[in-house]
Amino acid sequence: MSILSTLAAAGTTAAQTTAAAGNTTGTQAKDATTNTFSDIIKNSVINNFVSDISISKMLITLGVAFLIGFFIYLLYKRVFSGVLYSKSFNVSLMGMTMITATVIIAINSNLVLSLGMVGALSIVRFRTPIKDPTDLIFLFWAAVAGIVTGAGFFTLAIIGSVIIGLILFLFIKNSSVETPYLLVINCEGDDSERAVHGHLNKSVKRYNVKQKTVTAGNIELTLELRLNDKEGGFVNTVSDITGVKNALLISYSGDYVS
């Protein structure tokens, strides 16, 4: 009996020791999981925000930003199709790329500075009106290129800029095959107007009436059309129609406000 009691007591002690070890292991695993998650957050902050910025990194980043900004400058100058080309606006695109890259470098260096700069930049408002949507595309492109370059993703910035530049060049430069014209005609009455429409049906590819103004003894027509032949000869033939007082042909970009 004494031997059996001894064996039973030994088994109970071993079971208690195993259970205690299991509980200890579980607690350590839970603590390890908690510590690992907190360590990940701390390490991400420490690794992403470094107070010391090397001179070589700054020079390389600004150099890449300058090259991308210069590429945007050349492309904008090449594909510009507006009325008045603004060199100052084009230079500002290159400057925006480098300035944005500089800001991102500073943000990456300090967590407190990044939070403060985000708050400061959030109150900045630009009042300069952008009339051409293409200019807005180039502005956003320059800003994004500076952000990506400042973050250190040089390959993404270069490849993305090259692809965007090719797409913009192909679609903007070769977007218009036929030149649109506005034809302004002053004629005497309905008979001369019908004669004008009959002549246009035969001599132009297509046309549509943009505006018609009728006053006493005069009808003014504004028409958008695509020509088949030379502009000078077409205006002369329209002016020779009976009842037409004068005809004016204007080349325009396709945007019309009546």
Image (cartoon, rainbow, N blue to C red):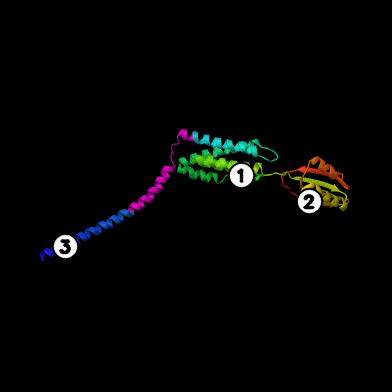
Q: Which residue is mark 1?
A: 137
Cα separation between marks 3 and 1: 83 Å
Task: Give the secondary structure at mark 2.
Answer: strand
Q: Earlier in the sequence, mark 3 or mark 1?
A: 3
Tell me the residue at 36%/52% (across/down): 34
Q: Earlier in the sequence, mark 2 or mark 3?
A: 3
Residue 9, labelled with which disc? 3
- Left or right: where 250 falls relative to 132: right
- Magenta highlight: main SS: helix
Cα separation between marks 2 and 1: 32 Å
Q: Amino acid at mark 1?
A: Ile
Cα separation between marks 2 and 3: 108 Å
Q: Residues within 10 Å of mark 2 (few under 14, many from 20)?
A: few
Q: How many circles with numbers are drawn on the protein?
A: 3
**Residue 22 vertical placement versus 163 (above, below):** below
Q: Residues within 10 Å of mark 3 (few under 14, many from 20)?
A: few
Q: Is residue 42 magenta?
A: yes
Q: Position of residue 25 (x, y in %)?
A: 28, 55
Q: Position of residue 105 (x, y in %)?
A: 49, 39
Seen from the viewer's position, the closer of residues 72 and 181 is 181
Seen from the viewer's position, the closer of residues 133 and 183 is 183
Q: Position of residue 110 (x, y in %)?
A: 45, 41
Task: Give the secondary structure at mark 1.
Answer: helix
Q: Is residue 93 magenta?
A: no
Q: Amino acid at mark 3?
A: Ala
Magenta stretch bounds: 31-58
Q: Amino acid at mark 2?
A: Gln
Q: Which residue is mark 2?
A: 211
Q: Position of residue 11 (x, y in %)?
A: 18, 61
Residue 217, labelled with which disc? none
